C-alpha cells in the first residue's frame, strides 16, 4: 500500500453507526475532520475490525487526510506487505471509520471482512475513550487502495433509479409495440374480411352474369335451331339433340380459323361453326312445313294436300 495512494474512507450522506443511530455527514463535516487531523498530536491507526481492547495492534497509520467532492480520503504509512497482499486478494473489501464523540477527531480506520492476521512486530495501538467512540461503516471496498472503484449507496441508488426509469421506458415501448402489433393484426383481419367479401361479391356477380349470358345464348340458340326446323334444314325430331350438342360445344374453349369469302381470316367458336354448317345445309322439302300447326288443331287450314305429302315422301 503505497504512501502516496489516497484511499476513500468516508463520504457525505446518512449512515447507521454501531449503536444503531443515524449519523449524517455533510461536506462541512468531512472538511472539519480533514482539517482537524494532526498525526503529531494524535495519529489514527489502520486496524482490522473495530478493536475493543487498547492492546490491539496497528497495521498502518493515517498520515494525512483530505476532503473533496463529498468524500474523505486518507494516505497511509507503515502498512506491512502482508496487509497489502490481503487487500489485493480481496480478503478485506470494506472500510469503516471510528470517530471520537466530537465527530471531528479520527480515532481509527478499520478494514472489515475477515479475522485479524497473525503478523509479528506490529506497533500496539493506544486507544483512549474507546467506549464513547462513533463507528461508521461506509461499506466502501478496501480494494480501492489498489485503484478498484466500488459504488457507494448514493451511486447505487442513483443507478437503481436510472434502471427503473429504463425499465419503465422499455415497458412503455413494449406496450406500444404490442398495441401496434394488435392494431396491425386487426387491420389485417379487416382487410382479409373485406377481401373475402369482395371475392364473394365478384363470384356472385360472375355467377349472375354467367347465368344471364347462358340464358341469352340459350334463347339465341333456340331461335336459330327453330329457324332450321322451320326452314326444313333440320328434322323436328332432331331439334333437342342439336340444341344439347350446340350447348356442349358452347362450353368448349376451342375455335376454328378459316378464310372468309372476302379473303380475311375469321375465327369461329365450335358452336358457331356447327350452327353455320347446319344453316348452310340444303333444304329438305319433306320437313319445310312441319313446324306449322297440326292439321287437327282447331280452326287450322291445311297448307298442303295428301297428294302433295305423298309426292314428297
Image: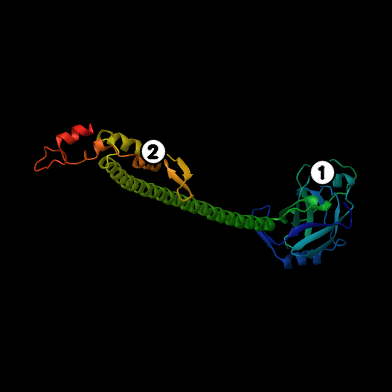
Name the secondary structure under disc 1.
Answer: loop
Nearest the eye: 174 or 246: 246
Q: Is residue 130 left or right of residue 166?
A: right
The crowd level at tag 1 (other Cα within 10 Å; few <14, some 14-19, many 20+) is: few
Q: Which mark is residue 89?
A: 1
Q: Which mark is residue 249?
A: 2
Residue 104 percent location from the top left of the image: 75, 63
Residue 237 percent location from the top left of the image: 25, 33
The colour mode here is: rainbow
Let me know if residue 21 appears in the view. no
Eyeballing the image, is 239 above or below 47? above
Nearest the eye: 58 or 186: 186
Residue 48 percent location from the top left of the image: 79, 47
Q: Is residue 261 left or right of residue 111?
A: left
Which quarter of the rendered picture does the C terminus lie within?
Answer: top left
Q: Is residue 34 left or right of residue 200?
A: right
Name the secondary structure under disc 2.
Answer: helix
Sequence-first tag of 1 and 2: 1
Q: Is residue 282 left or right of residue 145?
A: left
Q: Nearer the viewer, mark 1 or mark 2?
A: 2
Amino acid at each position: 500500500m503505497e504512501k502516496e495512494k489516497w484511499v476513500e474512507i468516508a463520504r457525505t450522506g446518512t449512515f447507521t453507526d454501531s449503536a444503531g443511530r443515524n449519523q449524517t455527514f455533510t461536506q462541512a463535516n468531512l472538511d472539519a475532520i480533514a482539517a482537524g487531523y494532526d498525526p503529531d498530536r494524535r495519529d489514527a491507526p489502520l486496524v482490522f475490525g473495530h478493536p475493543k481492547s487498547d492492546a490491539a495492534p496497528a497495521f498502518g497509520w493515517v498520515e494525512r487526510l483530505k476532503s473533496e467532492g463529498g468524500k474523505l480520503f486518507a494516505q497511509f504509512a507503515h502498512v506491512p506487505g502482508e496487509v497489502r497482499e490481503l487487500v489485493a486478494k480481496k480478503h478485506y473489501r470494506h472500510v469503516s471509520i471510528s470517530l471520537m464523540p466530537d465527530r471531528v477527531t479520527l480515532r481509527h480506520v478499520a478494514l472489515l471482512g475477515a479475522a485479524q492476521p497473525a503478523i509479528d512486530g506490529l506497533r500496539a495501538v493506544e486507544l483512549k475513550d474507546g467506549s464513547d467512540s462513533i463507528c461508521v461503516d461506509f461499506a466502501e471496498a478496501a480494494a480501492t487502495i489498489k485503484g478498484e472503484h466500488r459504488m457507494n449507496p448514493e451511486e447505487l441508488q442513483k443507478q437503481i433509479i436510472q434502471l427503473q426509469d429504463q425499465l419503465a421506458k422499455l415497458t412503455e415501448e413494449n406496450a406500444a409495440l404490442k398495441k401496434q402489433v394488435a392494431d396491425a393484426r386487426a387491420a389485417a383481419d379487416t382487410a382479409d374480411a373485406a377481401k373475402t367479401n369482395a371475392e364473394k361479391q365478384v363470384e356472385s356477380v360472375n355467377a349472375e352474369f354467367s347465368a344471364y349470358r347462358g340464358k341469352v345464348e340459350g334463347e339465341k340458340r333456340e331461335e336459330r335451331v327453330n329457324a332450321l326446323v322451320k326452314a326444313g334444314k333440320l328434322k323436328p325430331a332432331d331439334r333437342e339433340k342439336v340444341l344439347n350438342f350446340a350447348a356442349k360445344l358452347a362450353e368448349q374453349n376451342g375455335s376454328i380459323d378459316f378464310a372468309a369469302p372476302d379473303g380475311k381470316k375469321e375465327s369461329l367458336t365450335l358452336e358457331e361453326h356447327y350452327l353455320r354448317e347446319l344453316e348452310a345445309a340444303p333444304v329438305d322439302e319433306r320437313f319445310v312445313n312441319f313446324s306449322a300447326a297440326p292439321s287437327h288443331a282447331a280452326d287450322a287450314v291445311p297448307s298442303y294436300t295428301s297428294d302433295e305429302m305423298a309426292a314428297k315422301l
